[in-house]
Amino acid sequence: MKSNYLVLGLAALGLVAHAAPARTERIFLAGGCYWGVEAVFEHVRGVRSVVSGFARPAGDTTVPKLTLSPVPAADGSAVEATEVKLSSETGADLYYTADGSSVVTGDLPSDTAQLYTGPIPITAPTTVKVAAFDQAGNFVVDGGDFAPAAVALPDVPTGLAATKTQNSVSLTWNAGPASVTGYQVTVYDAAGAKLGTQPPVTTVPRQTVTGLQPGTAYGFTVAAKNAGGTSAESAKITATTNQATDSITISTAKWKSGDFRIVGTGNQLGAIVQAYRVNADGSLGTAISGATAQVVAAAPPGIGDWNIRMRNTATVPSNPGRIIVKSDKGGQAGPFTVSNG
């Protein structure tokens, strides 16, 4: 049966007469938590030292069994695992460290040792050291090196297709498995060189690339990402943006309750512009009913203005967020963020 003991000077408890300064005595005390009892007696006047440990029944020197799953490699190499499980005999206490530090100091768990209560997760290369203590205070240590299981790269995306406008190309492709965490579209110029600015990673199998030049050929690829890294790029497709027919811009767009206004410019007088909502992927959404205007003459010559104004019951009930404005002559501007005010 296990008992925790403490050794301390008797003079501290007043159990012996005043002894010569050089003389010391020892006393053994049982305590449920030897660390807690040790801390108390370390502050008692006259106690020179306190040592805690187990009092083992006579003749019980058999160390407990200790099992790690997965089993550490005999040659010291790292074993692939997502977690490490420990087991021992009934009544044994299990301790571990996962930072490479010692799990035992003397015949006790070290200060860095943690009581094992469940599987030890392996999310990076880890040195696990473990110890099992039985009821008699006998213990055994073990351990090994572990590393996360390697994750295979995702398959190359397939089915890449493009829909073009004057200044943008909308791309779609076949969705990958649930393990895919994102997709990276890469844009190339007509000579096959990557553009200096690339689209951000998207988590859905579609993306609209904006800011392109009218009547210009571009190349596009897409790669998939997962926990293991990034796949190779898909087969490249080529799309040529539509030729410029007219050019429009959005200067401001503001919404407040009962008033929605969009102002911009155009270079073809008489052109009709229409405002649209923007889909989550940045592509052209549904038309905003009533949000139309005509490009009219403005100074300086060669530049026209357009002004969409919707008030009271004719306006939209809430801020549409982002908009695209499209001309019936082919020009397009946006996405543009609508501000409140």
Image (tube, rainbow, N blue to C red):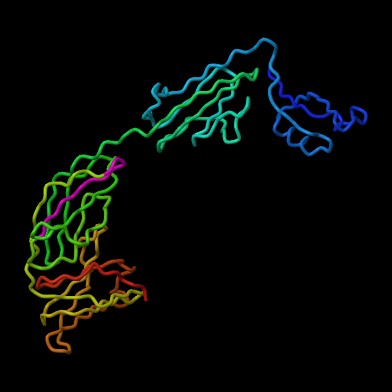
Q: Is residue 276 above or below residue 103?
A: below
Verify whether residue 221 appears in magenta: yes
Where is residue 269 shown, x and y percent of the image? Answer: 11, 82
Q: Residue at x 31, y 41 (%)?
A: 227
Left or right, 323 with reference to 97: left
Where is residue 174 shown, x and y percent of the image? Answer: 18, 45
Where is residue 96 shown, x and y percent of the image? Answer: 53, 30
Q: Quadrant of residue 47?
A: top right
Q: Is residue 222 above or below residue 5?
A: below
**Residue 232 vs residue 295, the one in the foreground:** 232
**Residue 111 vs residue 185, the one in the foreground:** 111
**Residue 40 vs residue 7, the one in the foreground:** 7
Left or right, 55 with reference to 142: right
Q: Residue at x 7, y 67 (%)?
A: 215
Q: Is residue 230 above or below residue 215?
A: above
Where is residue 178 shown, x and y percent of the image? Answer: 28, 40
Q: Which residues are magenta?
A: 218-229
Residue that protrudes farthest toward the right in the picture: 17
Q: Quadrant of the N terminus?
A: top right
